[in-house]
């Protein structure tokens, strides 16, 4: 259990039992009404490019900052817990960090939808590019601030058409939330494709990783670190489950070379332990991953 001197993830909105509408891909530990997207956006915007998300289309996506510097993206699992990439937080202190929710255009300074929270605790996974951020003050659920569904540990998403959304640089000056269609690539195909890259023919795809994409000029590049790979739930096309966290890419848009994502389903036991406050995970330095991590 979490000690009285620590700040822990709240579980007040965690579902304790499966309902009749649960799907095998979604964890029964997901928040109520999780993953609800708004494809039309929540307010009118004069110009939204084809590769941009609508304002507040994905209300669980947050931006991570070190003081004024944008670090990358993250996803709200509960009202006070954010899942992101560990490599974004190496050598960072919680006092220098904050999380911004409700954002769309990062250059906008006076949006009434944007809320900021300070960081109370950072937990880095010791072997994977994954981190959980606990906030000092919870976000209240609103239409423009929500939580994404969590996958069940046994879930697979091979060949599904999914989305990546984040503030990666599509153009030099672009700081709007973007969206990119990604098809999840099965492990055998992904490993074969990656063996044809500089990783070499002996490369073994780690169980903590999944692959998606590989279309020319559509992979995740600079600035997408920590952003979610998310798939629509069967029968509920506007409701999404968190499948992966942007890990690294090879060649950034090279054809037939998938991007790598940390598998959230594979990491759900670790995540659930933290969300349920059942273990006290110490701070650990994050080791550089064996195949290399591209720092955004």
Image (spheres, grey):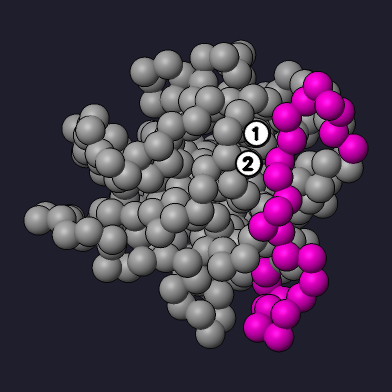
Residue under pointer 2: 81
Q: Secondary structure at mark 2?
A: strand
Estimate the x, y position of residue 149 in percent, counting from the top left. Answer: 60, 62
Is residue 195 something that shows in the picture? Answer: no
Question: Which residues fall within the magenta stretch?
Answer: 1-26
Height in image: 254 above or below 131?
below
Q: Position of residue 109 (x, y in %)?
A: 24, 30
User: Magenta span: helix, strand or loop, mainly?
Assistant: loop
Looking at the rendered image, the quarter that the N terminus falls into is top right
In the rendered image, the vertical position of residue 97 relative to residue 127, given as above or below: above
Between the C-alphas of marks 1 and 2, the distance is 5 Å
Q: Residue at x 32, y 68 (%)?
A: 39
Residue 121 sits in which quadrant? top right
Determine whether label 1 and label 2 are within 8 Å by CB: yes
> Disc 1 designates what residue?
134
Q: Quadrant of residue 153?
A: bottom right
Q: Is residue 25 magenta?
A: yes
Residue 61 in the image, given as x and y percentages of width and height: 45, 48
Which residue is painted at 47% across and 67% down in the image? 36
* Magenta span contains residue 166: no
| Chain-order first, disc 1 or disc 2 | 2
Q: Residue at x 78, y 42 (%)?
A: 274
Q: Secondary structure at mark 1?
A: strand
């Amino acid at each position: 259990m979490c000690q009285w001197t620590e700040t822990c993830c709240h579980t007040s909105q965690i579902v304790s039992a499966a309902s009749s509408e649960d799907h095998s891909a979604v964890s029964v530990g997901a928040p109520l009404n999780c993953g609800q997207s708004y494809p039309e956006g929540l307010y009118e915007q004069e110009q939204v490019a084809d590769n941009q998300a609508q304002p507040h289309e994905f209300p669980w996506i947050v931006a991570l900052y070190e003081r004024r510097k944008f670090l990358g993206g993250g996803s709200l699992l509960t009202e006070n817990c954010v899942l992101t990439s560990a490599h974004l937080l190496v050598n960072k202190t919680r006092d220098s960090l904050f999380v911004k929710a409700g954002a769309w255009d990062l250059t906008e300074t006076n949006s009434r939808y944007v809320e900021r929270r300070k960081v109370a605790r950072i937990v880095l996974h010791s072997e994977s590019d994954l981190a959980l951020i606990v906030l000092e003050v919870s976000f209240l659920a609103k239409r423009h601030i929500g939580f994404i569904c969590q996958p069940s540990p046994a879930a697979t998403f091979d060949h599904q058409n999914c989305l990546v959304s984040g503030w990666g640089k599509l153009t030099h000056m672009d700081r709007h939330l973007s969206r990119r269609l990604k098809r999840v690539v099965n492990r055998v195909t992904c490993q074969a494709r990656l063996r044809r890259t500089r990783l070499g023919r002996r490369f073994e795809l780690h169980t903590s990783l999944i692959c998606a994409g590989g279309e020319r000029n559509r992979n995740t590049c600079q600035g997408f670190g920590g952003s979610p790979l998310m798939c629509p739930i069967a029968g509920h096309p506007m409701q999404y489950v968190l499948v992966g966290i942007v890990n690294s890419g090879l060649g950034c848009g090279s054809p037939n070379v998938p991007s790598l994502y940390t598998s959230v389903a594979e990491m759900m036991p670790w995540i659930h332990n933290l969300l349920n406050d059942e273990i006290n995970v110490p701070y650990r330095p994050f080791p550089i991953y064996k195949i290399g991590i591209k720092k955004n």
